[in-house]
Amino acid sequence: MPADDVAGSDFTRMQVLAFLGRKGPASRATMARELNLSPATVSQVTRQLIHQGVVEPLYFAPSEGGRPGQLLGLVGDSGRAVGAKVAADHVVLVDVRLDGQVMATHTEDFDATAEGAVSKLSGLLSSFVGRGLSRLLGVGVCVPGVVGRPDIGEVDAEVLGWAGVPLGSHLRQDLGVPVLVENDVKALAVAERLFGKAQERPNFVVLTVGRGVGFASVCNGAVQRGAHGGAGEIAHVIVSPNGRPCACGQRGCLEAYVGMEGLVDAGRTSRILDKGQGVDELRAAAERGDVRAREVFARAAQRLAQAIAPVLAALNPDAVLIAGEGVASWQYWDASFRNTLVHRLPHWMRQLPIEVDEWDDTSWARGAAALVLAAPLDRNASAGEQRPQVLARLHSSSSGRP
Ligand SMILES: [Zn+2]
């Protein structure tokens, strides 16, 4: 008997909802097979969900046995989460459905270093949530920094000028809903697993390029957090002792070479960029066919691959997913990254898939929302006390209560 075959349990219920959210309409037989549940359990759970207005019967599709099978689909609005990406100078807010669809988005200037920044953030979230958002399960926030525990949400983020900021408790008090806080790359990994490229991949890594460089690994479906939430923090690993100065105060960090500032600096040294020009101009030069600009990206890609190869060998993932603002210029990284990696990985890993994400301004914030939407499925308990609260809200929203 399958391990989770407990009809009507929170976990089974959420498994069915998440499956329909990810895959779209499916028959009961397909769900039973894919989720390793008995047909009786699936029938019972889906009957409850239909009764509660969360799932609806759709059309009939030809089934494998020739008999028509009825497909069930998610009533789109059965659960929503708000996600917020906090950057040093702006905040992006999104309203995301259980199936991952972004329903609304809002971007606002924000000075993370200003006094009262957390209260300002809370105010922004409060007015976003307060515009009549129904069936809200909770709020997820992602930050470019280290978070000890997502369910507590204390943030250390040098980029934001935050040290030990009790963001989670502040927001929970102000908003009165479940709040989960996480490092931005780890949140992105949760979204990849829930509705992205890693749905079928229990072991994968996310590598982000952009302003900085980020990394997260997922093993057996769980995002690795390490002892203090700092697992995957490779940006300030020293790749060149006494090398380029880094914003963190050290010299020779990986980020000092492959982050935005490093690229721009290399562009200036190579006389491709003038003062005041940035990474967009560098990409434009590469697009025009400027060999020196392409060389800047290729050298960064080589450094990145050199640094990441031993990490990948240690983790043996199913795939490497490339994300972040830098994917806009990834075509100029790609060949150098792959070639370097292939020569540094053990031979059995040389077919390792490297896939580039679609990226837009809402991608980080959507990751933050995924923290809430994935909480009911959270088996390594990083959602802590917030998980039962998210579940309770899912129950009440699906039984029609506000
Ligand atoms: Zn550094």
Image (cartoon, rainbow, N blue to C red):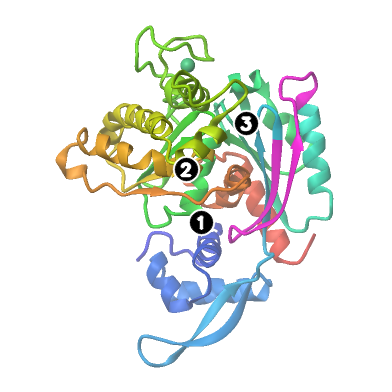
Tell me the tag on residue 195.
Answer: 1
Task: Report whether the residue tagged 1 is closer than 8 Å to ligand 1.
Answer: no
User: Does label 1 or label 3 sit earlier along the sequence?
Assistant: 3
Q: Position of residue 152 (x, y in %)?
A: 62, 31
* Real-space Cα separation, disc 3 to disc 2, in angstroms: 45 Å
Query: How many labels, in total?
Result: 3
Q: Position of residue 326 (x, y in %)?
A: 50, 38
Task: Report whether the residue tagged 2 is closer than 8 Å to ligand 1.
Answer: no
Which sits in the foreground, 314 or 296?
A: 296
> Which residue bears the numbered disc 2?
287
Name the quarter where the N terminus is drawn: bottom left
Q: The residue under label 1 is which amino acid type?
A: Phe
Q: Residue at x 43, y 10 (%)?
A: 251
Q: The residue under label 3 is which amino acid type?
A: Ile
Which sits in the foreground, 334 or 212?
A: 334
Q: Residue at x 71, y 24 (%)?
A: 112
Q: Secondary structure at mark 3?
A: loop
Q: Are marks 1 and 2 in contact (CB under 8 Å)?
A: no
Q: Secondary structure at mark 1?
A: helix
User: Does label 3 or label 2 sit earlier along the sequence?
Assistant: 3
Direction from residue 283 to residue 365 in the image, left or right: right
Q: The residue under label 2 is which amino acid type?
A: Glu
The answer to if 93 sits in the magenta stretch is yes
Q: Give the vertical position of 5 relative to 160 (above or below).
A: below
**Magenta part of the protein: which range?**
91-117
The answer to if 289 sits in the magenta stretch is no
Q: Position of residue 331 (x, y in %)?
A: 41, 44
Q: Position of residue 127 (x, y in %)?
A: 83, 44
> Which residue bears the numbered disc 3?
152
* Real-space Cα separation, disc 1 to disc 2, in angstroms: 32 Å
